[in-house]
Amino acid sequence: MLNNVLSQILYGISGFLFGIFAVRNSHKFVAKIKEIRMAKGLGLGSILEALPALLFFLVALFIFPILFYTRTPIGGFVYLATFIFYNMKGRARK
């Protein structure tokens, strides 16, 4: 029983930390897209330049939660709650 409780706590902590990591990098992605769009406009070259950041953003938004939910619902819930909370907090600041 103690083993199960500790495992759930660790999944919750890992969900929180991965959520913070994903939010930080998604904010970097949005800043990079804005910078590229201001410098080059919206063309094929600018889209290809931002492609790695876009792929990471999509992985952080869809793949990480699916991986957490397949292992434990607590990790996935904490990840999504952290991701949504800090994204809303960042938008309210701007």
Image (cartoon, grey):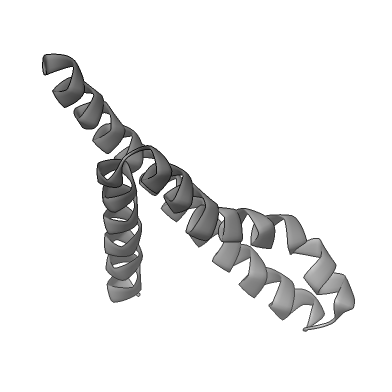
The answer to which of 38 and 59 lies nearer the viewer is: 59
Percent of width and height locating residue 51 = 75, 62
Name the image quarter holding the N terminus.
top left
The residue at 43%/51% (across/down) is 65
x and y percent of residue 16 in the render? 30, 42
- Where 35 sits versus 83, above or below? below
> In this orientation, which residue lies closer to the viewer: 72 or 35?
72
- Which quarter of the image is occupied by the C terminus? bottom left
Taking the spot 49% from the left edge, 60% from the top edge, the residue there is 27
| Res 23 → quadrant | bottom left
Q: Is residue 81 left or right of residue 59?
A: left
Q: Is residue 68 above or below residue 53?
A: above
Query: Residue 49: which quarter of the image?
Result: bottom right
Q: In the displayed structure, does residue 65 sit left or right of residue 77?
A: right
Q: Is residue 71 left or right of residue 41?
A: left
Compared with 50, 94 (above or below) is below
